[in-house]
Amino acid sequence: GAVVSQHPSRVICKSGTSVKIECRSLDFQATTMFWYRQFPKQSLMLMATSNEGSKATYEQGVEKDKFLINHASLTLSTLTVTSAHPEDSSFYICSASRVGESQPQHFGDGTRLSIL
Amino acid sequence: GQQLNQSPQSMFIQEGEDVSMNCTSSSIFNTWLWYKQDPGEGPVLLIALYKAGELTSNGRLTAQFGITRKDSFLNISASIPSDVGIYFCAGLTQTGANNLFFGTGTRLTVIP
């Protein structure tokens, strides 16, 4: 159980393009989903916390107008990187926790974003 | 944010050897988690620790939640080639699914 699916797994696009990444909890409901960014050989850094039905909470230094997050249902959150530039190239990973008791976050397989 | 320091940064060991890595913080955490990440994939949860002093095993893996709540270790016994990957500790400062801070990672290489 506790499967989190991300799509797409890899994106290569031109500078200036907006890219949408989906995160789905396949077999459980998640009121909260999380978006992380991981640069090569570095740890995961939390970008934002996505709450179903409300605005996302962004970590310090993360531009909310550039990284748009929508959490439309208990099983889906989307991250849109608007007008992406080469410096936005990174590995983006989402995670989700079950509703109810404190549970560890379960992670998706990540999306490798490459901006040319 | 909170800083979790892992050591060692990387390890090269012979297949069959035991491995030990640890994670320390200057802050107190209520939950410690250990994840393994393979290249190009998301982290996979290995062990979750919820109580200071708790010692938990998952197959060949054993992890402990330090009494001070500021550290944790992960041991892997009788390593095998598929243990290769990056191991991250992560901590929650409060009970609940928020504020998960990741350690710097330990890269493990197992030589057959």
Image: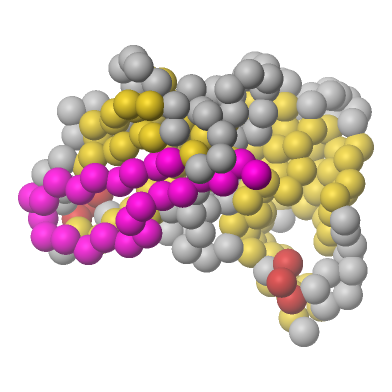
Q: Quadrant of residue B109?
A: bottom right
Residue A13 covered by magenta stretch: yes
Q: Residue at x 71, y 55 (%)?
A: B8
Q: Decide which of A9, B88 is in the foreground and name it.
A: A9
Q: Is residue B29 magenta?
A: no
Q: Give the residue displayed 51% in from the left and 43% down from the top.
A: A26
Residue A114 in sight here? yes
Image height check: is A112 above or below B34? below
The residue at the point 83 percent across, 69 percent down is B79
Residue B9 in the image: state x and y as whole percent. 65, 56
- Which stretch did the figure color magenta? A1-24
Q: Vertically, is B6 above or below A8?
A: above
Toward the left, the furthest residue is A16
Query: Can you say which quadrant of the picture contains the C terminus of chain B?
Result: bottom right
Between A95 and A83, which is closer to the camera in this rendering?
Answer: A95
Q: Give the side of residue B101 with respect to residue B57, left or right.
A: left
Spot occupied by residue A107 in the image (x, y as percentages of width and height)? 54, 44
The structure residue drawn at horizontal position 65% and vertical position 54%, both measured from the top left corner, is B36
Is residue A84 shown left or right of residue A5?
Answer: left
Q: Residue furthest front?
A: A27
The x and y percentages for residue A50 are 39, 26
